[in-house]
Image: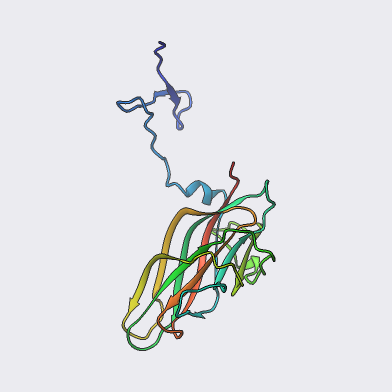
């Protein structure tokens, strides 16, 4: 049995070697230098886009009409995948009295037979790195698309308000729970007890090559 000591070069002083640490079972102890998404954001790989105007909520579980959909139009086999980091909703109008809204989502099982329509222009897709430049990827964001009903599921929490107003919001962190490969489609719909609750929905996602 060989015994050896692992060392690493110190980043601030490459000429200096420092020992690596392990736990009682011999597993290396690794601490992230920066929060997990900093590197992706710094590479310009994280984007965000959403509706510009409020849309009436539905008052029953949706079926084949989405409010907003994110489609990956990359080349299959060689293109990037989209990691959905968050979904959000902002109330732009609500009725007097008690009201609430929530977001449901659908990860569609098959590639759509017809390519979705780019209802949100590339110029309206924002890089999450300041001065990150214009969007040059292959994402297509479709509004009010006809989609397959692949069982809509609740996403996050519901928002309840008791007065007329705007600004009620949901910001749901997904942390790459949803992966959209080339040809994949992901959709959101706002659900409420009244169609007079209007919302703007959107996504933030990272574009990466997966093995």
7 lies above or below 70 = above
The furthest residue to the top? 1
Q: Report how many numbered discs are placed on residues in the image.
A: 0
14 lies above or below 69 = above
Q: Which quadrant of the figure contains the C terminus?
A: top right
The picture places residue 47, in percent across and down from the top left corner, at 56, 59
Q: Which quadrant of the figure contains the N terminus?
A: top left
147 lies above or below 22 = below
Q: Is residue 165 left or right of residue 108?
A: left
The picture places residue 68, in percent across and down from the top left corner, at 56, 70
The picture places residue 135, in percent across and down from the top left corner, at 64, 60
At horizontal 36% and vertical 86% (from top left) the residue drawn is 164
At horizontal 45% and vertical 28% (from top left) the residue drawn is 13
The furthest residue to the bottom? 96
168 lies above or below 4 = below
The picture places residue 105, in percent across and down from the top left corner, at 48, 65
Image quarter of residue 122? bottom right
At horizontal 42% and vertical 11% (from top left) the residue drawn is 2
Foreground of the two, 20 or 138: 138
């Amino acid at each position: 049995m060989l015994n050896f000591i692992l060392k690493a070069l110190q980043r601030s002083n490459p000429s200096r070697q420092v020992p690596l640490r392990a736990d009682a079972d011999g597993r290396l102890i690794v601490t992230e230098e920066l929060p997990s998404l900093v590197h992706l954001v710094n590479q310009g790989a994280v984007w965000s886009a959403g509706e510009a105007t409020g849309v009436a909520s539905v008052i029953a579980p949706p079926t084949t009409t989405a409010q907003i959909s994110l489609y990956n139009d990359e080349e299959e086999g060689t293109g990037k995948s989209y990691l959905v980091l968050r979904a959000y909703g902002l109330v732009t109008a609500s009725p007097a009295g008690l009201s609430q809204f929530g977001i449901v989502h659908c990860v569609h099982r098959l590639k759509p037979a017809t390519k979705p329509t780019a209802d949100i222009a590339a110029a309206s897709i924002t890089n999450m790195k300041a001065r990150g430049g214009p969007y040059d990827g292959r994402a297509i964001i479709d509004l009010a698309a006809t989609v397959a009903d692949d069982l809509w599921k609740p996403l996050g929490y519901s928002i309840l308000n008791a007065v007329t107003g705007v600004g009620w919001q949901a910001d749901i962190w997904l942390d790459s729970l949803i992966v959209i490969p080339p040809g994949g489609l992901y959709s959101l719909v706002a659900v409420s007890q009244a169609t007079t609750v209007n919302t703007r929905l959107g996504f933030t996602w990272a574009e990466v090559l997966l093995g």
